[in-house]
Amino acid sequence: MLTTREDAPETSTVKVYLPEPPTDATRGYIIEKLRRIFGDGVSISIDIDPSILGGFVVHSGDRLIDASVRGRIEQLERLLKAVDIPPWDKTADPRQIIRALKNALATATPGVREERVGTVASVGDGVVRVAGLGEAMIGEKVIIGDSVPASVLDLDESEAGCILLGPWSDIREGDVVRCTGRPVDVPVGPDLIGRVVNPLGDPLDGKGPIRSLRRRPIEGPAPKVSQREPVRTPLQTGLKVIDALVPIGRGQRELIIGDRQTGKTAIALDTILNQRDSGVICIYVAIGQKASTIAQVIKTLEDRGAMDYSLVVAASSSDPAPLRYIAPYAGCAMAEEFMYSGKDVLIVYDDLSKHAVAHREISLLLRRPPGREAYPGDIFYVHGRLLERAGKLTGALGGGSMTALPIVETLAGDISSYIPTNVISITDGQIFTEADLFFAGNRPAVNVGLSVSRVGGDAQIPAMKKIAGPLRLELAQYREHAAFAQFGADLDKATRQQLARGERLMEALKQRQYSPMPVEEQCAFLYAMTSPGIEELKLEDVPAFEVQFISFVRENYPGVLRRIKQAGVLSEEDMRLLSEAASRVRRDLLAQNHARGNQAKAS
């Protein structure tokens, strides 16, 4: 219904759009009717726009009266999207499509539609200021012009600040901005597995459109405390140093932090590769990475068969800041769909440092007041509301989980700077990669002293928990003795022996990239490395000892590995057998070295 003159806002210009030029009689009739509605003092202009197909459109200030054929078609399309049933999807149930069409047609209200709209005041660098738009909400999706999507991120008394989620080269001042009444959403569901998409859910891999019938808002509430369960189920990374000393559980938020080029992404990729046959769905979110780096990650996952249970959300450094900003939220929405369906999900945010930079860029363009290091005051909330959505759900909600591995880059090992301290305080522990360890050849370069898991032994199988205690104690003693020994003091025999054992344990924790180890083999090998006599091995013989010991146990004691894998326990008899195997392999290795030495002397 058109409002009367008394209800009409004060305005000076009214624009009328018609599909074809009107006759003089029609023009006079239109002007008379509009002056009754908007007042006698208004200026009325009539423009021709064939795209409206029929009817008319009236635009005055923040009011848009749409009685066009195009407007009715758009209204029907929005109703169809709201019920998530695209009629052109051949895979959908025809009865479901017919039912959705009937509901949409029954809901459609033919006739005049009146909207509150805004107009573009300024545009640039991925941000647009919109005059009017008084009924918009934070996070709401708006449409600029005919088709460019945007999201409302800032509201004040006279203008709304929006981030552009599409091309903005054709946007001009004065373009109409329409509210949609719904938040920004992305496609979700099993159809995304194996695909590479951008933060809007559009495919980037050339494998055709995403035929998902469901969509989910990128922003959503985190599960309540009453909807969560304690984290007790291990999420095996396949890395000895992490599974033994910094364990991760399903539903945990474990930060990977360290300097540039110290193996942070490698840890995340090894964890994804180790989820084969575990039932865990993996999502890798690339935020602000070079396109070549993202391509290399995708190739690694494809070559090793990990894309069968993974999906990649890519927002490269060449993408606009708004896409980099929404990327982790889009990935989280895709993960939530699986979590609330009762599945276990692992999501990697690589990395939140660049996400914070994108948010700072947007906030400065929106003229928000800067705070510490020029970041806006809500930067803690930006990451908090993202990471709090991970967790382990109760059985009543399906028992699904979302495990988050955010990555944060430090500068010169400074973990006390602004963004690292923020994310550390949000997460349930951190894995700290150290440049000195990396360049010394300790890969993964995890600093065990600064790394911590607040879930601890609850996220370990009993066998690993039994082994991890003595291992952690020996490594702590080694670090203490090594710090004392660097002063060149004379050391007694017991201290030298402890240093020798510690050096061999550090060597045992090294692992080649993309070579995750099953947890049962980890338990067997680490138990062997904590057994007496291991200091007799030469440091360079530890890798050979690992290969020969694992092979020996597989051939001679397969029942031990089977019991660890199935029951997760290490009995006294199993420990005796593993000790015997370690002694046997160690003696054989020493004998081989002795024989090689004698042969070298003879030659």
Image: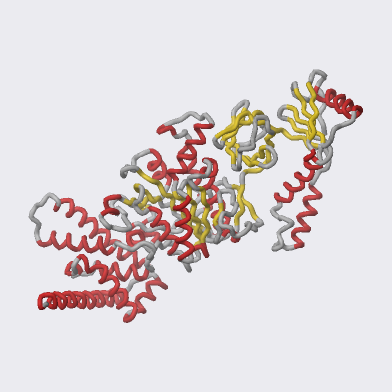
Q: Is residue 216 above or below residue 165?
A: below
Residue at point 63%, 57% (across, down): 209
Q: Nearer the viewer, residue 9 or 362?
A: 362
Q: Is residue 13 above or below residue 103?
A: above
Locate residue 36, reporting x and y percent: 85, 23
Regarding residue 396, the answer to whether it shows in the image is no
Q: Residue at x 53, y 47 (%)?
A: 329
Location of the N terminus (image quadrant): top right
Residue, x 77% and y 40% (percent of image)?
A: 51
User: Is residue 551 shown left or right of residue 315?
Assistant: left
Residue 424: image location, x then y, percent: 39, 45
Q: Depth check: 414 or 138 in front? A: 414
Left or right: where 526 falls relative to 401: left
Q: Residue furthest left?
A: 490
Residue closest to the eye, 465 or 171: 171
Residue 103, given in percent of the width and then of the height, sits at 78, 52
The image quadrant that residue 592 belongs to is bottom left
When asked about the image quadrant of residue 491, the answer is bottom left
